[in-house]
Image (tube, grey):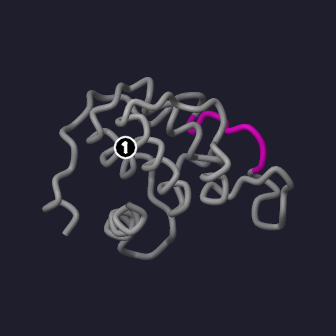
Amino acid sequence: ELTMYKDIFVKMDPSGLGVVSASQARNVLERSQLSVEDLSEIWDLADSGARGELSLGEFICAMALVGGRRRGMELPEVVPPELVEYTNESPEPDARSAGAAGAPQDAVGGASPVQSPALPPPGPEELD
């Protein structure tokens, strides 16, 4: 799954900036057919810096949370320890995450970028 998530991210970031916008991420996340409420919570957890965009690690975190939710898992209140490294959060802030550690905040003015009805899930052909 990790390789697939990286491949999707790279396709959304052809210029290699290392981030994808909220609208780019929304287009992929909505294909999960999760509720807007679930996707909003996932966004808030994954966008650890509350910048309104996702780094590769944050995107991986979001996709892992989507996958878990689709398998029936409840969404956590905080990023699970196994995903913290992807969001650049850590219990002890380091040089990379000093400004991003702590509780996630809403991404854009208190609202999630997920606002429209869900789209069909991506098929394998969309990943090529």
Question: Foreground: 80 or 52?
Answer: 80
Say which of 124 and 101 sits in front. 124
Measured as percent of width and height from the top left, residue 49 is found at 67, 49
Total numbered labels: 1
Say which residue appears at 61% left-offset and 48% top-offset. Answer: 51
In the drawing, does residue 71 fall left or right of residue 46?
left
Q: Tag 1: Cα neighbours inside 10 Å, few (<14), some, or many (≥20)?
A: many
Quadrant in which the N terminus appears:
bottom left
Vertical relation: 23 (above or below) 127: above
Which of the 4 image quadrants contains residue 97?
A: bottom right
Give percent across and percent down for residue 2: 43, 64
Q: Does the magenta stretch include residue 89?
A: no
The kind of secondary structure element at disc 1 is helix
**In the image, residue 123 above or below residue 30:** below
**Left or right for 23, reference 102:** left
**Figure quadrant of the C terminus:** bottom left
Image quadrant where residue 70 sits:
top left
In the rendered image, which residue does mark 1 sit on?
26
* Dominant secondary structure of the residues highlighted in magenta in the image: loop
The residue drawn where x is 31% and y is 38% is: 30
The x and y percentages for residue 23 are: 38, 46
Q: In this view, does 122 lie to the left or right of 66?
A: left
Residue range of the region highlighted in magenta in the rendering: 101-108
Task: Inspect the magenta stretch and tell me whether residue 104 lies in it.
Answer: yes
Three-letter amino acid code of the residue under disc 1: Arg
The residue that appears at 31% across and 48% down in the rendered structure is: 28
Left/right placement of residue 52 relative to residue 91 reads left
Residue at left offset 37%, top offset 29%: 115
